[in-house]
Image (cartoon, rainbow, N blue to C red):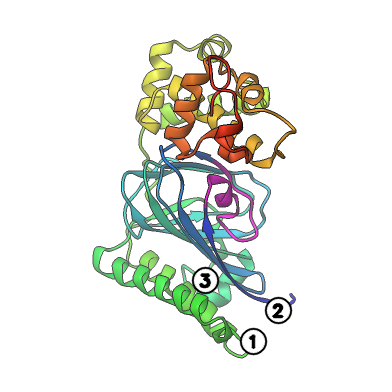
């Protein structure tokens, strides 16, 4: 393993920045909350080991495909509203285990902050040495949720944030001679919450609703970038609108129609952000995603992202035609 050292920090100005929420691993992200996203994302890399700490101010839906052979252990540092990973309802300082090659999904209903370690499963024997159960790789091969003790959890998460803050401010502090120390200091913060917790909680909430949501999202992945109507989903999956609505309300706190609109708005945001001015128009992209009332679309877009679609594309609003068909 080549020993490389990395300390990186950046401000987030869109949900796309959270695609690198875990250093070295791609995460699919969709914005759920309204408003312009603001946040920060910091990484520390020590060889194949990394720590990522991110914070954001609006609700998010995150997914990660099963293509990563690294173990990820995460901790919830802050949450304005409910946070759920798989069927686990998370509380502050709880620890989440994402084994190698396992798909993951999470829902942040409001502004949140998290920390995530990513490293080889073979390293647990060394990194968690002294704790028989934790140093056994088999302990980490299944997804898990560890409920943090209120007192020790707060201390551990505070210490973890301080370590990151220190390394971010003083990058020179991370050197080959002390890299192993910093790595073990980071792991210790996570381990403290695992050791003091209850056994992994696999009881979950609303498993049937989440199974239905997964079927819907799998179908949306299969259909590609085209917009999908809620009636198409009901017909294809043979589920009533009432059942679908109840599942979306329980999992996301919004109905399926709103969820699909948010998903289309996120698709438009990414297209406009990646397009050069003059290569396309707001109206064309909106229409491609099923928005035909452009005035209402512009309102939805501004409410969701805190900026006009023309600003995302890089065109000054004054240069656009204002009227019934095209708007900022």
Return the residue nearer the eye: 202 or 180: 180
Asked whether the residues under the numbered discs 1 and 2 touch, taking CB atoms below 8 Å apart as contact, a structural biologist would say yes
How many neighbours does mark 3 have within 10 angstroms: few (below 14), some (14-19), or many (20 or more)?
Answer: some
- Residue matched to label 2: 3
Nearest to the observer: residue 46 or residue 293: 293
| Position in image of residue 290 (x %, y %) | 59, 17
Q: Looking at the image, which residue is at 49% across and 78% down?
A: 169
Residue density around tag 2, few if under 14, some if 14–19, many if 20 or more, within 10 Å: few
Decide which of 304, 16 is in the foreground and name it. Answer: 304
For the magenta stretch, what is the residue range? 13-29
Magenta stretch contains residue 5: no
Please identify the quarter of the rendering in which residue 4 is found: bottom right
Q: Which residue lies furthest to the front in this view?
A: 318
Q: Position of residue 195 (x, y in %)?
A: 37, 68
Residue lying farthest to the bottom in this orientation: 177
- Do callouts 1 and 3 mark residues in contact (Cβ within 8 Å)? no
Q: Residue 266, can we see it?
A: no
Residue 35 placement (x, y as % from top left)? 41, 40
Tag 1 residue = 176
User: Can residue 28 be found in the magenta stretch?
Assistant: yes
Question: Which quadrant: the N terminus?
Answer: bottom right
């Amino acid at each position: 393993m080549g020993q490389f050292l990395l300390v990186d920090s950046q401000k987030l100005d869109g949900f796309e920045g959270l695609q690198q929420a875990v250093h070295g691993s791609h995460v699919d992200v969709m914005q759920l909350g309204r408003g312009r996203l603001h946040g920060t994302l910091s990484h520390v890399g020590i060889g194949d080991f990394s720590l990522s700490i991110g914070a954001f101010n609006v609700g998010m839906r995150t997914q990660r495909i099963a293509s990563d052979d690294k173990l990820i252990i995460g901790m919830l540092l802050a949450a304005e509203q409910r946070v759920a990973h798989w069927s686990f309802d998370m509380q502050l300082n709880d620890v989440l285990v994402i084994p190698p090659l396992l798909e993951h999904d999470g829902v942040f209903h409001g502004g949140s902050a998290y920390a995530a370690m990513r490293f080889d499963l073979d390293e647990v024997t060394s990194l968690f040495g002294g704790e028989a159960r934790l140093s056994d790789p088999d302990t980490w091969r299944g997804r898990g949720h560890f409920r943090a003790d209120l007192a020790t959890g707060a201390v551990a998460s505070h210490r973890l944030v301080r370590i990151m803050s220190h390394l971010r401010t003083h990058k020179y502090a991370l050197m080959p001679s002390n890299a192993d120390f910093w790595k073990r200091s980071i792991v210790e913060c996570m381990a403290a919450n695992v050791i003091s917790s209850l056994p992994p909680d696999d009881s979950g909430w609303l498993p049937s609703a989440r199974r239905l949501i997964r079927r819907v999202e799998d179908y949306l992945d299969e259909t590609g970038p085209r917009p999908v109507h809620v009636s198409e989903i009901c017909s294809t999956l043979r589920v009533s609108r009432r059942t679908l609505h109840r599942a979306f309300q329980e999992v996301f706190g919004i109905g399926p129609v709103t969820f699909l609109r948010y998903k289309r708005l996120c698709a438009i945001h990414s297209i406009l952000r990646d397009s050069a001015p003059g290569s396309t128009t707001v109206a064309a992209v909106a229409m491609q995603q099923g928005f035909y009332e452009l005035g209402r679309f512009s309102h939805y877009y501004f409410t969701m992202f805190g900026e006009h679609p023309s600003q995302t594309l890089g065109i000054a609003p004054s240069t656009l035609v204002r009227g019934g068909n095209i708007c900022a």
